[in-house]
Amino acid sequence: MKISDVLNKKKSGVSFEFFPPKGNAKGADGGVGPFMKVVKELEKHDPLYASVTYGAGGSTQARTMDTLLKIKGATDLNVMSHLTCVGADKESMDALLRDYMKAGIENILALRGDAPRDMKDFDPSKGEFRYARDLVEFIKKYDFFSIGVALYPEKHPEAPSLEKDIEYAKMKVDAGADFAITQMFFDNGYYYDFMDRAIAKGINIPVIPGIMPVTDFNKIKEFCSFCNASIPQSLERKMLPVLESPEGIRKTGIEYVTRQCEDLLENGVKYLHFYTLNRADAINEILAALRIRPAKEPNEQKKGSGPV
Ligand code: FAD
């Protein structure tokens, strides 16, 4: 089902983002069994959709598709593929989109992407798409997909200003985006301020906040340094007394993010998009604390419950 239709229908809900587990090309399980267990565990929250990331420069293209097909085959989840265009040409993009159409994958998060960190000879200028907006325009022509885009409450790292970033964001919305998901943030003030500015610029699609459960503080700080998300003083202060205790960090992080989600919901936010990092436990705890109860029991018999 198209996410645009899901959002029209459902007045609230959560969504989950996964990355393709590292499978073994020779067919051994390679983490896929445990991965599907996590997906099925989170399916009980009846999410709006489950999305699968796409490695920088298309580096996980086959694994992304494979993971989407596995989720589709083993669950009732609505799936969305992330798709980056930097370095891609239109012919291969067309082939990929046709494969998605054949597979019944109707939702795409259209991204520019970044050059892969480990590919020294990667030349983004060789690509035929410059910005995510070009990809949105390209996908729109198929008249098949519901299209999402990424937005940045604290500004994209390359943008000269938040104002300019929102101007460019409006262009990708006008090109045909149905909804947006934000970069993670830990201070809701950024999201509220961003939304005021975005709405004033005419961005009127659903903008779903991206929520990162904090369980490993050092790892989160590392992510934040790549993507221009700031760690609020209040979170630093709460972490200070527990820094020597992984369990203390986890508890403090989950409490913080639960409170963050509560605040968003109390302020009228309808949907939350969780970066799962392919783990269910922290998200289960946050949703339980928010009293967002599982919509249905996981059905172990459904479409085969073993490793797929
Ligand atoms: P764009 O919208 O093209 O913006 C990129 C930069 O260009 C911004 O600074 C913008 O201000 C600027 N810009 C846009 N238009 C113009 C213009 N006309 N003139 C001048 N400047 C302009 N990356 C992955 O590799 N795989 C993933 O699966 C993935 N998933 C993500 C999911 C979410 C929810 C988010 C928030 C990010 C994700 N990313 C992913 C990261 C994303 O690819 C990077 O942040 C990337 O640097 C920008 O992508 P974009 O689609 O936002 O680019």
Image (spheres, rainbow, N blue to C red):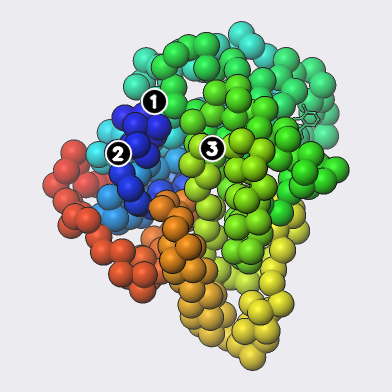
Q: CA distance from mark 1 to mark 3?
A: 25 Å
| Quarter holding residue 294 | bottom left
Q: Which residue is mark 2?
A: 9
Q: Position of residue 216 (x, y in %)?
A: 58, 70
Q: Secondary structure at mark 1?
A: loop
Q: What's the residue type where badge 3 is placed?
A: Asn
Q: Which residue is mark 1?
A: 105
Q: Which mark is residue 297?
A: none
Q: Nearer the viewer, mark 1 or mark 3?
A: 3
Neighbour class for label 2 at 10 Å: few (<14), some, many (≥20)?
Answer: few
Q: Which residue is mark 3?
A: 204
Q: CA distance from mark 2 to mark 3?
A: 17 Å
Left or right position of 307 against 96: left
Find out whether the residues at labels 2 and 3 contact each other: C-beta distance under 8 Å. no
195 vs 79: above or below: below
Which of the two labelled residues, at mark 1 and mark 3, occupies the earlier sequence position?
1
Q: What's the residue type where badge 2 is placed?
A: Lys
Residue 169 in view, yes or no: yes
Find out whether the residues at labels 1 and 3 contact each other: C-beta distance under 8 Å. no
Q: What's the residue type where badge 1 is placed?
A: Ile
Which of the two labelled residues, at mark 2 and mark 3, occupies the earlier sequence position?
2
Q: Quadrant of the C terminus?
A: top left
Q: Quadrant of the N terminus?
A: top left
Q: Residue at x 48, y 41 (%)?
A: 206
Tell which quarter ligand 1 is in.
top right
Left or right position of 216 against 154: left
Which of the two labelled residues, at mark 2 and mark 1, occupies the earlier sequence position?
2
Q: Nearer the viewer, residue 270 or 20?
A: 270
